[in-house]
Amino acid sequence: MEFSNLPMSPAASTLRLRIAQGVIVLFHLTGFVGLAFSEDKSFYLTYTPLTLVLTLGLLAAFQPGRNLVFWLFVAQVFLLGMVAEIVGTNTGLLFGHYTYGATLGPKYMGTPWLIGLNWVMVTYLAGMLMTYVRVPALVRVLLGAVLMVGLDLCMEPVAGRYDFWHWTGELVPLRNFRDWFLLALLTQALFVRSPFPKRNALAPLVYLVQLLFFFGLTMLAP
């Protein structure tokens, strides 16, 4: 169901948005409390794929005009993310030497399918946030890439602890952030150049919740 294209009153539209926002906050808050304070963290980690897919589904539901151009953008970013990660995990030429754990689910050539979807989500969120800023397209691409790397910075300190991914020697190489930024520039350029409607009322909250989720876990880590 495409919420954003349904004829509805402003009150009904606001109610749907508030329900979606509540679901996002509830899932992430439950996961945060479980991972930060529960003795059995594995129980909560099993819901990581569900939370990511649910979040993507809700974002898609509030994206107006989900036409061929929009899905082409999604497919391009998904493939770019997957190819880059497959190269990284199998050769170390991109990002550095690392392997994925079991938390993110089924893999292809050592890379979880969900990682491709995560590249789509992070690109989309950062791109949508930059639509609120009246700057030239090139600046939007640059700042959008910075937002993407910022989210990765918050994830890295807890990634190994929760079996998302593991770096050789347990050290995150600086080239990981360099390569993240370069790939983010490419995906942000695709976002800016793809002519689908660039508005999504749910996107700002999702980015903020993701940022606080990982930043909070980092602050509470022993």
Image (cartoon, helix red, strand yellow):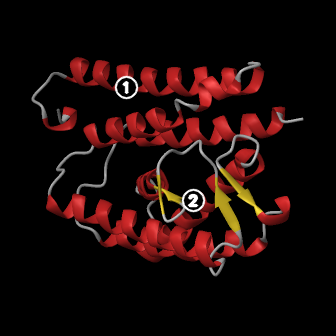
Residue position for label 2: 148
Mark 2 residue element: helix
The circle drawn on residue 20 is 1
Q: In which image quadrant can residue 208 be found?
A: top right
Q: Position of residue 187 (x, y in %)?
A: 43, 69
Q: Going 53% across and 43% down the picture, which residue do you hit?
A: 207
Q: Residue at x 68, y 44 (%)?
A: 163
Mark 1 residue crowding within 10 angstroms, few (<14) / some (14–19) / many (20+): some
From the top left corner, tell me how far across and down residue 156 is, in percent. Answer: 72, 53
Residue at left offset 74%, top offset 18%: 38
> Horizontal placement of 152 versus 128: left or right?
right
Amino acid carrying label 1: it is Ala
Q: Amino acid at mark 2?
A: Met
Q: Is residue 154 above or below residue 77?
A: above
Furthest toward the right, the residue is: 222
Please say whether residue 181 is visible from this viewpoint.
no
Q: Give the numbered dot on residue 118.
A: none
Disc 1 or 2, which lies upstream in sequence?
1
Residue at 17 percent of width and 32 percent of height: 1
Q: Position of residue 36 (x, y in %)?
A: 75, 26
- Mark 1 lies on a secondary structure that is helix
The spot of residue 184 in percent (x, y) is 52, 69
Q: Is residue 29 visible?
A: yes
